[in-house]
Image (cartoon, coloured by chain):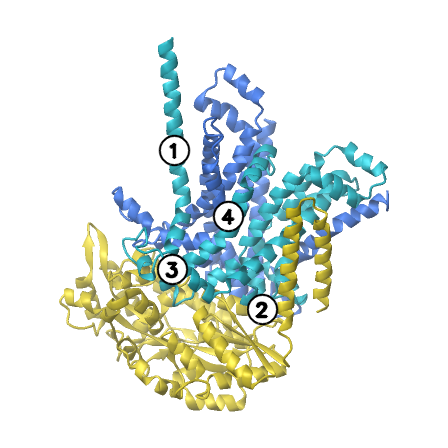
Chain colours: A cyan, B blue, C yellow
Amino acid sequence: MNENVRSSSYRVGLIRTALYALMLGLTVVTAFPLAWMVLSSLKTPAETLRSPPVWFPASPSLAAYVKVNRVIDTPRSFLNSAVIGGVTTAGILVTSLLAGYVFAKHRFTGRNALFSVLIATMFLPPIVTLIPLYRIIESLRLDGNLAGVILPNLANAFGIFLMRQFIAAVPDELVDAARVDGASELHIVFRIVAPLVTPALAVLGLFAFVYHWNSYLWPLTVLEGNYDQYPIVLSLSRLLSYNRSAINTNLVMAGATLAVFPPLMLFILLQRSFVKTVVETGVIG
Amino acid sequence: MRGSPRTWTILLLSPSVGLLAVFVFIPMALSIWLSFQQWSTQTPFTAAHWIGLGNYSEIFGYGPVGRDFRQALANTLIYSAESIVVILPLSVALAVLLHQAALRKNHILRTVLFSTYMVPMVAVALVWSKLYSPAEGPINQALGWIGIAPLSWLSSPDTALSSLVMLNVWQQTGYFTVLAVAGLTQIPTTIIEAARIDGARGLKFFWRVTLPLLRRTLLFSGIIALINAVQVFEPVAMITQGGPVGSTNVVTYHIRRVGIERSEGGLGSAMAMIVMLILGALVSAIFAAAGRRSEA
Amino acid sequence: MFFSQQSVVLLYLTAAMIWRLRTHMARWTAMVVVCAFCQGWTLSARAQNPTVTISFLTHWPPETVAKLSAAAKAYMKDHPGTSIQIRAVPFADLLTTLRSQAGGSNAPTLASIYSLWLPELVRDAIVTEAPEADAAEIRKDWSESAVTAATVDGKIYGYPNEIDLYALNYNKELFAAAGIAGPPKTWDELLADAERLTKREGGHVTQQGFGSINSWAAGVVHPFASLLASNGGALVVDGKPALDSKAATETFGFIQKLIDAKVTDPSMGTADANTTGPYLDNFIAGKTAMIIMANWWESALRAGMGQHFANVATAPIPVGPSGNGSHAISYSWLTVVNAAASETQRRAAWDFLRWLDSPESGQNGASAMGDLLVSMGILPSRQSDVAAFSQRLASNFLAGYVSQLKAAQPFPVVLGGQEFTDALQHHLEAMQFGQERAPQAQAQAQRDAASILGNAAR
């Protein structure tokens, strides 16, 4: 008996150790490209070109970071990224909340049809509308400008879908009681419904922010080479010039490290509550 | 209540419906219309002239236009299929691992896995192009340590597309893992206990209990992964430019080249239509298959 | 202007809604975002004081863009009525950027373009003809091939800037190690030398005799076209593809011989979107003995190789069996003016260009344009610039190129030229990777070319 217990706890311990080892291995493999990026940014140009590769720079140098700031306007690029990510996210949150509320709590003819039509746009690859959309932005005289990057993205089907799912779970009685009390619809949405779906809003907000912070093709098309309006992701591609890239590897890696930093920090700050929210509520799922 | 319910419905819907109408539905309608026109992207829409199915017949014809587009389409489908086939099982396996009681409190792997999703694709592409470098890259070097001959990665038409898939897998698996963990968490404990009492253990438990209950999550994940994969653009634009021998030319890159660089707006729109129809058909098929399975 | 006001109202409303969020953090985030946005707005609105604003689109690297900005600033000081904005995109995005916005209100007034794109830009009325005085000056002061490349139907469309051509680059150290005295002069010598310069280890090529590029259209097609020209052939004759000529058959056949002899390894020849990657790396690392490449690579080679750069020598393109001499392919770039710009903008643009390309704008008789080109290791095309930089252009590496300029043949500038290049690239790469044999690749390339050039001329 005693023997049995000991061997079983021994087995549990073994399995636990194996699981930890597996997890550690996976963590290292996953983190490796990011580590390589940071390491390369600290190398000299000659070290980045050596074969077999140099893993650790002989004398790590921040020179590349200094040079990146000379070559591209990093603070301005971050500001542009923050504006694109921030304003777009704010817009998506507001439009999705309003529309999600209507689809969940209002009854009107054609509701399901309209909802389906809007949701169908989730499956539309952006390339389908790229050219005409660009011409529309141009005719509004918003090309070459951050406003042109932002405006078409202020509403999206995924957000509406997500908010409808969550607001549908808010009891009707709550909404009806507020109406009886004479609350306006705006008051209901922002003061009663919104606080109840805060986790979903947070998740939607993070996804929207990261997606738009990282977006490339649309800003590239709209900004037309106006590089003082470039977000960091586009500025990064400016470091890749056709006769300098070979010697600029450390520069490009420094730029990439800088570009990765803000969304990663945001995520690490929020990750506890974020992953918890996704896991517990099954947002998305 | 202030204002009629009807007014409120319209008022609250108008921001999103208005925006989607102007910036999604109108461009889409224009794309459909343009796909039947001969139109240079430089000229106003009024300069377009109707050529019926001319663009479509060129796409399905024997010329270089049709050949290149069909190759791009095939590449995109292979890229999407490989991505889904690798990402979904991997994310479920990782989710099961993360969901083990022993590891549930430990967040490092989860954080690291998911954090790759936050990295801009442009940066991912740049970093991986260096990792893949045949001579200066650490991957081939590491393979050499365990006695594997250097692989050509992006330098061969046989491996280039799959190399881009790996990059996609690295970036996206964490996201889908978190979704799968969410799915696992939602499995009611009563079901789990009932299955345990019935003697289901290990792999059998996984196939009989876990996987069927994850079906909704997997369906959703599969569709998201498909939509993401069809849009692949940055790694091709930043690294391969569609090569070697067109093996990584994908539809987004190709349509941009035809529709903007060569300014054949009509032809590019027709290609976009075909992509849209195929994606629509695939998504409907997946939903239909899922629906039939759940009825059975 | 009308729209920006509306957008500000919209922003205000957004902010007001966010203000109702409960937490301080949310409020502050909203505040920061809105302030940032407004700041961006005022900054972009501020640059509108001068009477005329023109913009200049280029693909140059940031360091060169800084030089161009400095030149523009110097010009603006003397011409307070003109404001010049510089815009830059990576090379791979240059044509799409130009194409997608041409004709739009915000299109660049000036753009530096590859001459191959010119016929289509002329056809689509995107670029404007040079004024009489400028055309005369260009004809007088630029080399003939540069003028030809800036001309469509007898009309000049811009100021030529850089000129590039191809030559054989070889690694002297590897040649010495293999006991080869000098560079190959003929195709037979090239093949024989390449065989002696190739090293294998267990079926793997560890050093390739000759490097051929893949995944980069011009990098694949220009060396091929240089070999073809040095065999008495041409890609296009009288606007029609000429890949079915005997000279072309021999060139395809020669490429096939290099491939069959396994003296060129395609996996060592891949270039990425920025023309770096294994192709460059292997030459820099001394694992490729010979390549056919253009002069503008100097800066990449120099920086990548350090002191080993001294091992690199330049020689004329080896001559084929039917060739009458070595003919490199040259191509050029030019600065054009957007036809959609207003009359005042166009006038200001040509005025700025004339100054930028004139001996007055630089030092010691060079133009500001020549200055920034030479800083990248690129050959300037204005005669006075060539003279001003004679010492720099006499360097070991560049002299081998400069001496070939006379015999060089310009890459054919025809409608559909880029698409034709893409198609030829496809078949040459298919040969490299063993998907097609020479006769098949030749026949299909000719058929594709006929279809593409035929469609483009329609």
Q: What crowding class fits label 2: few (fewer than 14 Cα within 10 Å), some (14-19), or many (20 or more)? A: many
Nearest to viewer (mark 1 / mark 2): 1
User: Residue C444 is drawn in which quadrant?
Assistant: bottom left
In this rendering, does residue B56 appear at all?
Answer: no
| Mark 2 vs mark 3, CA separation in Å | 31 Å
Nearest to viewer (mark 4 / mark 1): 4
Chain of the residue displaying label 4: A
- The front one of A189 and B55 is A189
The amino acid at mark 1 is Leu
Q: Which residue is mark 3?
A: A249
Q: What crowding class fits label 3: few (fewer than 14 Cα within 10 Å), some (14-19), or many (20 or more)? A: many
The amino acid at mark 2 is Gln
| Mark 4 vs mark 1, CA separation in Å | 24 Å
Q: Can you name the residue that lies furthest to the front here?
A: C24
Q: Which residue is mark 4?
A: A264
Q: Quadrant of the N terminus of chain C?
A: bottom right
| Mark 2 vs mark 4, CA separation in Å | 34 Å
Q: Do marks 4 and 1 both belong to one polypeptide chain? A: yes
